[in-house]
Amino acid sequence: MVDPSLSIKGLRAGYGSLDILNGVDLDVPQGQFVALMGPNGAGKSTLLKSLYGMTTIKDGSIEWQGKNIAGYKSRAILAEGIAFVPQGRCNFPVMTIDENLQMAAYTLRDARVRADRDYVYDLFPILKARRNTLAGNMSGGEQQLLEVAMAVLQRPKILLVDEPSVGLSPAAIAIVFNELLRINAGGQTILLVEQNTKKAMEVAHRAVILRLGKVIWDGRPADITHDELGELFLTGRMRGEAKAEH
Amino acid sequence: MVSAIFEQIVNGIVSGSVYAIVAVGMTMIFGVLRAINFAHGEYYMLGTFGAWFAIEYFDLPYPVAIVIGVVATAVIAVVVGQFVMQRIVGAPPETGVLATLGIALVLQNTVILVFGGGYKFFSGGYIEPVSIFGFTLAEQRVLIIIVCILVFVGLELMVTYSRMGKAMRAVSQNIECCAVVGIDVPQVALRTFILGACLAALSGVLTAPVNVSVYGGMGEIITFKTLPVIIMGGLGNVRGTFFAAMILGIAESLVATYVGLQFRDTVGFATLMLVLMWRPHGLFSAQARF
């Protein structure tokens, strides 16, 4: 791969003494939309959390624009241009949309905050219309969009998104994925973890499949059928293959 | 008779104001640090001692003594905040209980060690009577009510409009999300704690001319009166705390006059029990907010 902006090598990480990732290698070039998939417990969320400084890293490196950021704290990683949209609700429920965005811009210098909010409102007009609504009073889909917007507001060079479809209706899922596609079309690099494989395969440029803390398949979504994907999830290998390609 | 009741209500509002200024700091500290500050009354005591010291040893005027009491408490709060309170964030609940109880013992006994255990006489303040709407009231009591209103208006403006105030609300609503968006949680916790301690000190200095006596153990009773106030107000709720403090102040005043002075200190927990039977989340909200 040519000039990857993110290059993970031999990453072993987990929580306390428990290892979840057992040597992950992954390169993500700029502008790509990558979907991380895999069965439960494969380490997808742990990989995103490791990139955001929320796990214990035992071994390996996370090269980000020529710098090894393994072991950095979340705030420092954010300053390096990596933003994270965690799984589940991550907003301030009794604050308005506008206040939530202000909080998301907490690390930015004040003069820039105003302009940045306008930039996000232009990207997500639905939020602008409801800027004075309390976040907790919005639908799950709108809250998910808000959380994506809060991350986008940081003007990240790469956006880590963990299972944005959880708990959302099919209509809301469609909206969230459309928005992700749209910001990716604007040049935003996205690393997405998703259980909804069908939806993820539709939008991503590239699918990376994790199993038991390792990458077992990496390629274009068009190169794998849904049945093959299921087979990979269950057994770690594809029919007719001695071992899955790596 | 009616005017006598009304007078007791006014007195109740004065003590309610005192409780409100102390309690609002404790409830904000709870909102941000998720810990009940069992040493909260000690900052009330420290403020009073600071002012008493300034008046007694340096013969300074009362307004200067107020500033010295609050600033001295702020300095101690910075030290305690950095070494203890910041580390409570995210720790198991028992850590906060034990740490703050420990701080209470250390602060109280240090003051007793330095200044002795006896009662001291507080000589500052505005004790001249003034007449308002036909009532005679010491000027100091009027001052307490005015400061209480200013404090609450100020806090309301701060948490609504200032960057730090919003960050305090953010931490109290979703601490994990603060880490994700890059809010410096330990810094917010430290500032909230210092603010809370200063408000407790302010309350102490304002009440001293009314209570007159100053002693090392005076903070304990304040902590235990503040506790039912912040629970009634809905933990972490600024406005709720104000009304709960007023209810407690007025109820205490009426009970002391018409039931018996010896029952006054039971009013807080008795009211708390009644309120919790009716509204288990406190009077004003189902969730912590300010």
Image (cartoon, rainbow, N blue to C red):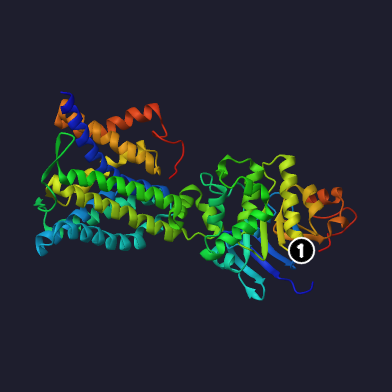
- Quarter of the image for the N terminus of chain B: give it: top left
Q: Position of residue A60 (x, y in %)?
A: 65, 70
For the question of whether residue A139 can be seen, the reply is yes
In the image, B271 versus A214, the foreground residue is B271
In the image, B109 versus A135, the foreground residue is A135
Q: Residue at x 33, y 27 (%)?
A: B274
- Label 1: state its secondary structure: loop
B46 sits left or right of A216 in the view: left
Q: Residue at x 70, y 64 (%)?
A: A24
Spot the residue most to the bottom: A66
Residue at mark 1: A32
B214 sits left or right of B38 in the view: left
Q: Position of residue A229 (x, y in %)?
A: 82, 51
Chain letter behind tag 1: A
In the image, residue A64 sits, relative to residue B233, either above or below, namely below
Q: Position of residue A116 (x, y in %)?
A: 60, 61
Q: Residue at x 31, y 48 (%)?
A: B150
Spot the residue most to the right: A240
> What is the count of numbered marks?
1
A11 sits left or right of B153 in the view: right
In the image, residue B15 sits, relative to residue A236, either above or below, namely above
Q: Position of residue B61 (x, y in %)?
A: 13, 59
In the image, B137 versus A192, the foreground residue is B137
Q: Quadrant of residue A219?
A: bottom right
Three-letter amino acid code at disc 1?
Answer: Gln
For the question of whether residue B37 can be seen, the reply is no
Q: Quadrant of residue B60?
A: bottom left
- Quarter of the image for the C terminus of chain B: give it: top left
Q: Quadrant of residue B267?
A: top left
